[in-house]
Amino acid sequence: IEASQNRGYRLSAEPIKYNQPLLEAWLNQVHTKCKIFVHDTIDSTNSEAERLLANGEKGPFAVISNHQSMGRGRLGRKWYSPTTGNINISVGFRPNISLIKLRTFTLWQGTCIAELLRSFSANDSISIKWPNDLVIKEKKLAGMLTEASIDSEQVRTLIFGIGINLNSSSKHFPKSLSKTSTSLKDLTEQNQRIHELSAQLIRTILLAYNKCVEGYSEKEIFDKWEKLDALYKKNVEISKGTELIKGKAIGIDTDGSLRIKSRNGRIRLVKSGEVSVSKW
C-alpha cells in the first residue's frame, strides 16, 4: 500500500499471500457468494473441509490455504505445496443426491476449470489428462481430488479439492517434480493475481457443481472433453496394480471411463489407473 500526502492511499500491488478481505472483495466482484475459511498453513484443505462437514458446517464453503503440510493427491500421493504463491482450495458440499448424478463430477469440473485457465492465461495449450490432472504439453499444472461420503447410493457430503501451480517456478520444485511439472508463471513469464483467479475458480466450481446436480447432456461433456483431452489418439499405458494395459486413448464413455483401443481393435473401458503417454 502506497501513501501520498494530501492524496491518500492506493493498493500498488496485490499480496502474493491470501488475504481474506481481499478475496471476499474479489468474490463480490465476480458475483459469487461462498463462505470461505482462509489459513496461512494447514495440514490439508480437503482434511479441513472434511472436519468442517463432520462438525455440521453447511455447504457450499471453501477452505483455502497458502501452505499445506500434508497436502494429498490421488492414490494417496503427497501434493507438493510450497509456502506461498500457489492455489490450494477445497470446496465442501452436502448434495444428498443419487451417486449416479455425480459419476462424472470430477471430469466435468476439470473441463470447466481448464476453460477458465485457458481464458485467464490467454493460452489454449492447457488440457486435461484423464482422470484428474490439468497439463500443459504433458507437464502437470494442476491436480484435482474428489472425496465423498456415501450412504445407500446417496452422496451425503462431497469435497472437491484442487491445487494449481500458480506463482512457483518449476525450477524450484523438488527434483522428482521439476521435469514433469509446470506453473502459470512458467507459462506466462509473470506473476499471476492469486485472489482474482481464486475467486473466479470458486465461482467456476460452484457453477459446475450446480450444472452437474441439475444434469447436463452427454453431448455437452463429450464436446468439452474432446476439445480439452490431452490423451486423445495417443498411445498410452495404464498401470492397474500388477496389470499393464496398452492401447490408444479415444476419449471417455458416459460413466467417465477412459476408452482404450487395443491393436486388435477391441475397445476396453478403464475406470481407474495410472496413465502415461507411451512411445511404443
Image (cartoon, grey):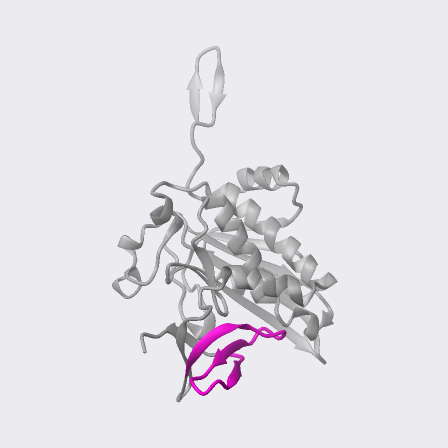
Q: Is 12 above or below relative to 171?
A: above
Image coordinates for residue 68, horizontal then vertical, percent: 43, 58
Q: Residue at x 50, y 70 (%)?
A: 131
**Which one is in front, 80 or 253?**
253
**Is 3 placed left or right of 254 in the picture?**
left
Range shown magenta? 246-272
Q: Quadrant of the C terminus?
A: bottom left
Please check the rendered image and state whether residue 250 is part of the magenta-colored stretch, yes or no. Answer: yes
Does residue 159 appear anywhere in the picture? no
**Percent of width and height locating residue 4:** 43, 15
Judge whether 215 appears above or below 166 on screen.
Answer: below
Q: How many labels sit on residues?
A: 0
Inspect this view and state whether residue 116 appears: yes
Name the residue at the top extreme: 6
Q: Nearer the viewer, residue 22 or 204?
A: 204
What residue appears at the point 60 percent right and 42 percent down from the top-left corner?
27
27 vs 166, left or right, is right
**Residue 105 image point, x, y percent:** 61, 66
Q: In front: 84, or 26?
A: 26
- The location of residue 19, given as percent across then percent down, is 50, 41
Q: Residue at x 43, y 20 (%)?
A: 3
| Residue positioned 48% across, 13% down in the render | 7
